Amino acid sequence: MAFCIAVIGKDNAPLYLTTSDMEQELDLQYHVHAALDVVEEKCLIGKGAPESKELYLGLLYSTENHKIYGFVTNTRVKFIVVIDSSNVALRENEVRAIFRNLHLLYTDAICNPFYIPGESLTSKKFDRAVQKLMSGNA
Amino acid sequence: MQIKPIITYSGSCPLFRSLESQILNAIPLDTCEWRRTFQRPTKHVRLEAQTQQFNVAALEKYKQGDWSILEHPILHIFVTECNDVDTYKGTIREEIDTWLKILTSYGISDWMILLVETLDMRKTKNFMPRTTVLDKIRLDFGSKNDDRCISVLNPAKFEQKSTESFRCLVQRIRFLMLTSYNRNIVKYEELIRSKREKRNVDGWDFRQYFFMQEDLALIFEKLELPTEALIQYDELDAMFSQFITHTGLNEKQQWLSHFRRPLDAFHGICLTRPDRFEMRNKIRDEGVSLLEFRNYLFERQAYLLLTCNDIPEIAKRLLNFLFSTLREVEFIKLECQEGALWCWEFVCALEVLQLCEQAMEPNEVTCFQHCAPIWNLAKDKLYELGKLCGLLPGCTPTSEQLHIVVQLSSGIGDAPPEQHQFLQATPQLRERSPNRKPKKSAAEQLKEALGSNQAFQKLYLELAELAISTYKHVARLRSARLVGLDLGNFYCALNEPHKAVGFFTDLLRELKAENWHTLSSQTLLELANCYRKMGDSLAYTKTCSSISCCAELETLVRTFYFDEFLKSLKTLKTTLSAQPSIENANYCVLEDHFRVLDIEVVNQKPIIQDDYILVQMKVESLYPRGIVAENIKLCYELQAAPLELAMENVSLNVSPSAVKVKESTSRLKVSLQLVYKQDNRLHSAAVACDMPKSKQPVRRTSSTKRKLSPSVQADFTNFVQAENIALQPGVNLVELKAKATRVGSWQFKQLCVSMSSLEFLSEQLPFTPPSFEISTKPASASLEFKTLIAGIVQPINLNVSGGSFIFPPDAKITLRCSKNLRIRQARNTTDEAAYNDDTSFESLLQVPLVQFKSFEERKIPLEVLTDMPGRKVSKHHEHHIALSCPWSRTELPIPVDFQPAMEATCRLHTCGTQKFLQVIMKGLDAHLLLQHAQVKCDVPGVQLLDLNPEPHQPIEIYKSLTVTFLYEIQVEPLKTEHELPVVKVHFVIKYAPLSQPAVWRTYGCAFDLVDYTTLFKLQAQLEPNELCRLRTVCNMNLKITKVHENPYTDLMYEVLNDQNLWAVCGRSAGVVSMKDVDSHSISLDVMPLSTGFLPMPSIRLSKYTAGGKSKTDAHSKVHPFPPGQVYNSTKSMQIHVIASVAGDQ
């Protein structure tokens, strides 16, 4: 369903990143990193009205094989999901659902009192849940 | 392709033809307001038209629902020039009726009857109203549509007068055309909808539907509604995609096979096509490939967007267009040559970019935002083509690859001849500057690039640079760096690693700043590769070192580079300058190799100058194996005094409470909040922080962003260091050491680790480093004592604190005492003889400071002794000791106060003429033994008789205990008082402190005896003597007798009685003269007021000096006698008073 799911901290450091395909991992990481440009751009536009801020940023950019979607939480933690662009059956609502679930998982993970904000997410439970989400079984 | 609305005519056709050109020319001359249905905004539209003769056959399609709005006549005009009512009634009426019936039968109501008047009606004014042909026509046909019947003066005949009526006609035609469109568009849209519903029915053909809807789009375009035209195309676009991706392999869609033709040609889009509808005809006539169809669709969309002036949107749509088309090609499994689609993508991308380039303003960011990825795409596609055709650096195309190039080149196709027709539609396109050569078309550029390695490289580099600069222009730095990575790799392949280094370091900086470790370690590998190729051993060493510390990389890679690092380090000859450059700031920072975990100053605080500073540092080495650091230095700098402290020093009036208040304000004001339910039970409890919104109580500090400026070397004049330390992977404990040379408050600043010639500097210590204090201490000496008691040996301590003073071996402190104070070094109490030797006390003492070291603190016990002064008053005895120390030239006087050990007072007592001396010793703080009390009097004729019992043992005296000694004074009678007004008496007693009973010291006290002779004697007697009754007047006899000759003649007596006990009847005082008499008796009446033993009323005798004898002495004066001169012999007599019998009754 998704190629890659990444959680990126407020200072743009990766907190968590997983890919379905190890061989493509490096390439995907580069893409996720570049997607931060668009995230920043979109956040800048939405800065005017914080009340009506939509967390879901929509499609950030697409390549021949990938579609890269973004989501930013109120604490400026970014979620990036890379999706196979040949999967035309995937609706935007499903992408939104992925982000919604991811947000919940993330919130659960950082509620752990032993988690230090800004450090990478190593929770196994979180990892398992995200893997499930990535394969579309969530 | 001409698109003009069609108007039909019938009736008098030759007449209409004569007017036709005039009408057709007039229609586009002006706009007409178009009121659209469904509250869409009104619009002013300029129309064109073409005419046809009315033909029923054309309407047949309309009735069947198989019509096109493009070909459908929009207005039907019936023309007549009949102006005779009778002729009209005879023939024309029939004709019109038939015509209208036909129209109605086809459901058409867009008609108009035009009456061309050739006769001047105004000349025949006698016509009755409503009797003209026009009136008749209106009456017959225009009952509801009055405006559809119109007459016009034949312009051919009435050139002057016809203008107004002709203008009305044209305006009416325009109006009716638009009204007709309103109706027809709605109808046509319904038709399209119904057609679309049937899309899954067998035999439905997309192409038919496509033309149908496109006709609508064309009409919208004609009516100057490009956005609505665009909607039609977008719908067609989406529908087509859906067909292919969702039902692509469905057998029902037979029409799809038309698009499934092999892609022999893969022409890109062309936005400058001279005939925009060339492809439309081709689609209709021959059928086209999917690619061509898609191209056409995009071109149309682009054209409409351009009409709307929305060039950024074209760029925005391009990528989606390319990707979805590729997906469609894949879905319907079109066969094509390898690389063909890359060529197509490339050409399309470049075509759009060229358009954007011409049209864009440089500050229009939105367009650049969309262009940047297109540049990147073009670059990527070119690269893939280059790879396919063997054009990459270091490759030479094989013959097979050359064959591919030829095939691709033919498939790319030629660009259509340059024509500006397309571009003319947009006035905002910038004119090319004349000295700039017109750019080659995209297809030509591609062909050229495929032609040779050099051309390929040139184009690739150009595209990459453009992609980078465009990304940078829109502030997408990360994307720009990513392109830089590709470009860097390309340069590496070109064997120009020095050009690649810049791109890699840029990327590395970006990645490192945001802690993308996996990616940054990859980039390091690339960099290492570059530096090795360049032979830059210095940079290579550093990079190897960094790589070996990347935890993300595999151990094998790390150890390999670690070995490389060590190997390379040995070969380095030149000392690396510690000056870091921006370039190597990325990877040669200490933080990437070592992690400082903790710094602790081991010394006790404060550190004294010239002492050693010992620092323990916990440092984690990230190297895969142990490594020897030749030198580890940690520098420290003077700590800037905190501002607040400085402030306090300046203004001393800042109270400490004010400082406290300051501290408390930095705390959060957290308060308890309890929420109760209605039944007063607790619902919830919380703590809340009330803060005004403007104040941000908590600021997030969890920033992980790294500052990547080159670490500047701090001031390394002061540092602690350790040498040749083996650092194992993981946590190491390193001890650093240095001599504290300068005084002050210091803080650690920077760590420097050097290995042979490589030096690592820390950016910033990861935590607030500990501060420490180096100080000097002045030497000091002080005396320490408790309450000192005079007269006995008192301990006193001399405290010497060495500080940082260096003592000479013969250093000593001299103590000089004030008068009567003596001092000695303390002696052991066990050695009694020495201890009791009072002569060892001296007024000047030199205390040698034997082997006194700096910072030593020594307590030297001393003993002081001072004489007990012979004064009676118990006042403190003030002394002082002056210290002269080796470190100071001035003497330091220290005040020393003594309290007396005991005190002596004396009293004179009289018994008749006998005199007694009482000495009272009062014990104070000390506990003493007394013995050998003696009085001495040197005055001749005065003898003191000791009346005290012979003591067997010393008398003890201590606080609040008094000891009394009594002596009788015997003065020889010959010696009168006149000769000896004062008798000096010395009282001497020996005392010893209880703790030192062997040492008897002498305490002496001198008393002055005055007025020691009794001059007068007083005697009082009450009569009756035996029984005094209450409230009975008694007689008191007072007798004053002169005992000793004296000069006082006038005496005054006073009865001083207690008011409760006695009442004096009559005068209670009087003056008597003792001149020439020895005694005087006075009788007074007194009355007792109380029963019991009452004391005799006391009498006071005073010297009396009568006043008025001299002018200065106007008043009488009374001077009391001192107690020794008057003896009252009945002073303590008591009178027994009994209750009066009579009085009680």
Image (spheres, grey):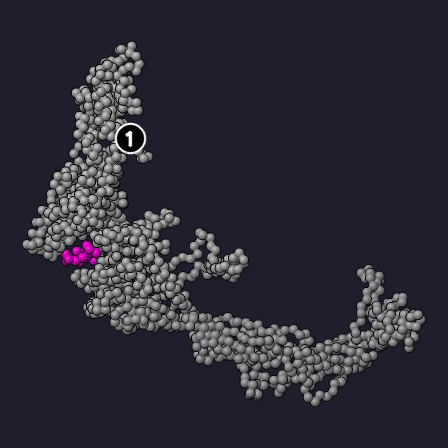
Can you identify the residue that label 1 sits on? B34
- Residue at point 63%, 75% (across, down): B899
Q: Mark 1 lies on which chain?
A: B
> Does any portion of residue B950 appear in the rendered image?
yes
Report the span colored magenta.
B484-502
- Residue at point 22%, 23% (across, down): B98
Q: Where is residue B952 in the image (x, y as percent from the top left)?
A: 70, 89
- Give B844 or B832, whichever is nearer the viewer: B832
- Residue at point 49%, 75% (across, down): B800
Q: Quadrant of residue B486 in the image?
A: bottom left
Q: Quadrant of residue B26 in the image?
A: top left
Asked if B27 appears above or below B154 in the picture, the reply is below
Classify 10 Å Cα crowding around label 1: few (below 14), some (14-19), many (20 and above). many
> Does any portion of residue B664 appear in the rendered image?
no
In reply to whether residue B494 is colored magenta, the answer given is: yes
Q: Where is residue B1088 in the image (x, y as percent from the top left)?
A: 88, 71
Asked if B43 appears above or below A103 in the picture, the reply is above
Q: Quadrant of residue B82 in the image?
A: top left
Q: Is label 1 in a helix, a strand or a loop?
A: strand
Q: Where is residue B820 in the image (x, y as percent from the top left)?
A: 60, 77
Question: Residue pushed farthest left?
Answer: B399
Secondary structure mostly taken by the magenta-highlighted segment of the chain:
helix
- Give B227 or B885, whichever is nearer the viewer: B227
